Amino acid sequence: MDVTEAVFARVGGVPAAFASRKEVFVEGEKVNWIEIGITKKEFQGMGLQESIFFRFVWQSYLGAIKDYIARKEGNKFFNYIRVAPSLFLAMFYIVGITSSKPEEMASVASTLAFLAVQPVSLSPFKQHVRSEKLFPNVNNLDQEPSDRQLAIARAVKPHEARLDEKTLVISGDYGGIEHLIVDKKGCNGRQKVLNSGDSEVDTYMEKRLKYDGVAGLDQMVIVDFDLEFFRDYFGFIVQRWRGNSI
């Protein structure tokens, strides 16, 4: 499959994670399809997925800003100069120097989609992304995707997989790699469920993905990242750093 960017991470010289980002246009909108894999169990819980994913989020958001400026009429160079004050205000807003969100940058967002098989893969987004910017909404099992979200899921899903259009749960994506299917009991050497500690997320994923047995289901996740996300996430990183430094 053609990808826009590929990333490989090593730990002690050993390949530990691989990831790819592919730009897909859905009804004129750019969507980034993300795939991340950890090579061995011992590399889980090291923060590799989080760091790679955030790199993709940041790059896609910068790309959204460039696209926004490129769509403006007039000379591109002067457009960058005109937008520069709003960009500085956006940075001040993200790091908490000001509480005023610049109106011009408020509408800019980047959209990412990926498959989650573990509760720990979904919980950070529930924590840092507003519910209207995220599918699925773990607080509402009955909520169906919007027309836009459904169109995105149809465009990015693996070709051989089947899509439940009411839940965006993917099935039939484990042909030949059944050993990667998550199993609640960890039978036959399969990976156990990695709960997040957030009961709402854990319960949601249990009901959707049916971990008992070898169902082999994945949850499609679609997220819109905007200034408010970066402000919230930056504050979270600062708090975590302060906690670790005490």
Image (cartoon, grey):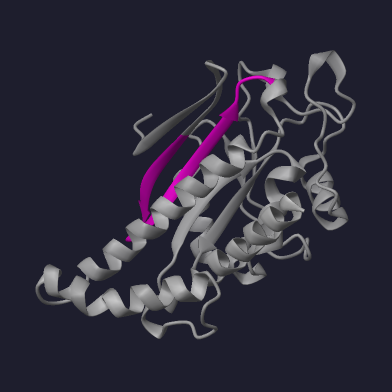
Please tell me in which quadrant of the rendered image residue 139 appears: bottom right
Answer yes or no: is residue 31 visible.
Answer: no
Quadrant the N terminus occupies: top left
Q: Is residue 64 above or below residue 202?
A: below
Q: Nearer the viewer, residue 240 or 141?
A: 240
Please tell me in which quadrant of the rendered image residue 82 appears: bottom left
Q: Mainly helix, strand or loop, the magenta region?
A: strand
Q: Residue at x 67, y 33 (%)?
A: 46
Residue 37 in the magenta stretch? The answer is yes
Q: How many marks?
A: 0
Please tell me in which quadrant of the rendered image residue 7 appears: top left
Horizontal and vertical percent for residue 43?
A: 67, 25
Residue 146 in the magenta stretch? The answer is no
Give the residue furthest to the left. 75
Horizontal and vertical percent for residue 3?
A: 36, 35
Horizontal and vertical percent for residue 53?
A: 53, 44
Give the residue furthest to the front. 246
- The region drawn magenta spans 20-40
Q: Is residue 213 above or below residue 137?
A: above
Q: Residue at x 47, y 58 (%)?
A: 111
Horizontal and vertical percent for residue 186?
A: 85, 23
Q: Is residue 33 above or below residue 105?
A: above
- Looking at the image, residue 198 sits to the left or right of residue 14; the answer is right
Q: Residue at x 36, y 81 (%)?
A: 104
Q: Nearer the viewer, residue 138 or 46?
A: 46
- Looking at the image, residue 59 sits to the left or right of residue 18; the answer is left
- Looking at the image, residue 15 sits to the left or right of residue 43; the answer is left
Answer yes or no: is residue 9 visible.
Answer: yes
Q: Nearer the viewer, residue 91 or 116?
A: 91
Q: Residue at x 71, y 17 (%)?
A: 179
